[in-house]
Amino acid sequence: MKQSTFESAEQLNSVFSQRIVELLEQGIAKKGRASILVSGGRTPLGLFKALSETNMDWSKVDISLADERWVSTDDDASNEKLVRNNLLQGYASKASFYSLVADKADAADAIDEVSARVSAMSQPFDVLILGMGEDGHTASLFPCSAQIQQGLDLNTDQQLIAVTPTTAPHQRISFTLKALLSSQNIFLHLTGESKKQVLEQALAGDDEFAMPIRAVLSRADVELMWAA
Ligand SMILES: O=C(O)C(O)[C@@H](O)[C@H](O)[C@H](O)COP(=O)(O)O
């Protein structure tokens, strides 16, 4: 794993946003459009702002999330709300956003509808930015969930699954490991010492069901973007 470490989150966000834009521009040059999957949570907030302030042809970029919480898009827990308020602003307001939610009480009943929607995105995804939880989950592939076998199954033909974490709030919809691994450039974006320790624990072991981030790290050429 290539590890890029920065003295501050601001420095990381500035370098990382430039890097992402270069990769998207390369994708556009090759295929006419490019795509990026971002993660929710608190870590990417400053990165979203830096990206939104970067000038490129965002009208040729498709954006979606690696995972979403099954809440209304005006709920503060909504990753879509976070993206709309922080990334799809300024220059990046011209990008096309693909929502992972649908008007169904249970995420499991919306998988076909949302899968059909995201199939219109430019694929393979040019850039994937993953986060990681203290329990070693990534996207919404939670070790505690009954759906973890399904989420890590590389023989699946599903891009998306519904997940019910038992140690975190909200039902989720998540890209499967197989779909995530099909991305061309995979980054793990972490800040703070405690996440670094969780990562070290993940790198030291091999039980993917206990720490699903291992399933990504052991199969893909992931670049770590870390700041204290
Ligand atoms: O919706 C989510 O919760 C995620 O996409 C999730 O995988 C997130 O990236 C990690 O939980 C880290 O979250 P923080 O950045 O808030 O620590």
Image (cartoon, helix red, strand yellow):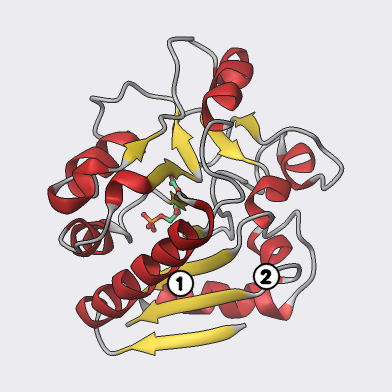
Q: Amino acid at mark 1?
A: Lys
Circles 2 and 1: CB distance less than 8 Å? no
Among the 4 quarters of the image, the one containing residue 65: top left
Residue at mark 2 to residue at mark 1: CA–CA distance:
15 Å
* For residue 130, above or below residue 1: above
Residues packed near mark 2 inside 10 Å, few (<14), some (14 to 19) or many (20 plus)? some
Residue 165 drawn above or below residue 31? above
| Up-down relation of residue 201 to residue 159 (above or below) | below
Left or right for 140, reference 103? right
Q: Which residue is mark 1?
A: 195
The image shows residue 210, relative to residue 113, as above or below, that is: below
Beta carbon of the mark 1 residue lies under 8 A of ligand 1: yes
* Label 2 element class: helix
For numbered disc 1, what is the local secondary structure? helix
* Rendered-image quadrant of the C terminus: bottom left
N-term-proximal mark, 2 vs 1: 1
For image coordinates 53% across by 41% down, the residue present is: 167
For mark 2, what is the residue? 217
Left-right relation of 2 to 212: left
Residue displayed at 61% across by 21% down: 111
Residue found 60% across the figure and 12% down from its top = 109
**Badge 1 local density, few (<14 within 10 Å), some, or many (20+)?**
many
> Is 67 on the left or on the right of 214, as rendered?
left
